[in-house]
Image (cartoon, helix red, strand yellow):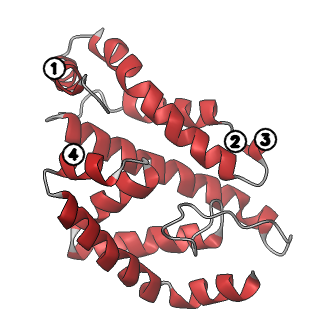
Amino acid sequence: MGPEQGQITMLLAKWNNGEPDAFERLMPLVYPHLRQVAAVYIRRERDPGLMQSTSLVHELYLKLLNQRKASWEDREHFYTFAARAMRLILIDHARSNQAQRRGGGAERIALNDEIPWVDIGSPELLELNRALDALNLIDPQKVKLVELRYFLGCTAEETAALLKISKATVDRDLKFIKTWLYRRMEPEAANHIRGQ
């Protein structure tokens, strides 16, 4: 996310104040990171033809564009919204592909190496979404951490900076969250592990 952090925050403030060109000036600063994240997801797809990284980022772009009335407080607020939007886009993608992949012997591709029991475009991704919704009722900060780290592809350091917490807290919380999610999703995770 680099040295343009202050510029991103400044453009978000201008966008909030109704300057029409602020969004157009903002996107070139955030687009490379968003495109890189999307490309990782697409490379992991068994059939990349189903969704391309450009279309994934464009879907995200449209969700962001429709948020013109949102009051972006800062870069952290923007990126946490972008992470949640990326999560929802991937969940919609999983829902649309669920019927096609059910029983079809499709290759299983992990959403992230740190949570290998959750596959892109799979029922496990839908179960992860339900588990994150439940965790959000208990601790919304931990859900933001998961979204930034696993859905937006931020490093542990970037996640810590965006959430204004230490990297040690990110590492400790992620360890807890992974265990919590695995236990919550255990029947699905156990089926996934047996199916490999």
Asked if marks 1 and 4 touch (Cβ < 8 Å), the reply is: no
Q: Secondary structure at mark 4?
A: helix
N-terminal label among 1 and 4: 1
The relative height of residue 186 versus residue 181 in the rendered view (above or below) is below
Residue labelled with disc 4? 162
Q: Residue at x 70, y 52 (%)?
A: 45
Identify residue for label 3: 49
Q: CA distance from mark 2 to mark 1?
A: 33 Å
Q: Is 157 positioned to the left or the right of 183 in the image?
A: left
**Along the line of sight, the residue nearer the viewer: 9 or 23:** 9
Q: Nearer the viewer, mark 3 or mark 4?
A: 4
Along the viewing direction, whichever of 73 and 17 lies nearer the viewer: 73
Mark 3 or 4, nearer chain start: 3
The extreme right residue here reads 104
Q: Which mark is residue 51?
A: 2
Q: Amino acid at mark 1?
A: Met
C-beta proximity under 8 Å, tags 3 and 4:
no
For the question of whether residue 57 can be seen, the reply is yes
Work out whether mark 3 precedes mark 1 in sequence or the reverse, and give the earlier one.
Answer: 1
Give the amino acid at mark 2: Met
> For the residue marked with disc 4, what is the amino acid?
Leu
Establish if 139 lies above or below 43.
below
Question: For the residues marked 3 and 2, what is the alpha-carbon distance in whole angstroms?
Answer: 5 Å
Residue 20 rendering spot, x and y as whole percentages: 28, 10
Tell me where residue 5 appears, x and y as whole percent.
22, 27
Q: Nearer the viewer, mark 1 or mark 4?
A: 4
Task: Name the residue tied to disc 1.
Answer: 10
Secondary structure beneath label 2 = loop
Residue 136 shows in this picture: no
* Measured Cα–Cα span from mark 1 to mark 4: 16 Å
> Seen in the image, is 62 located left or right of residue 13?
right
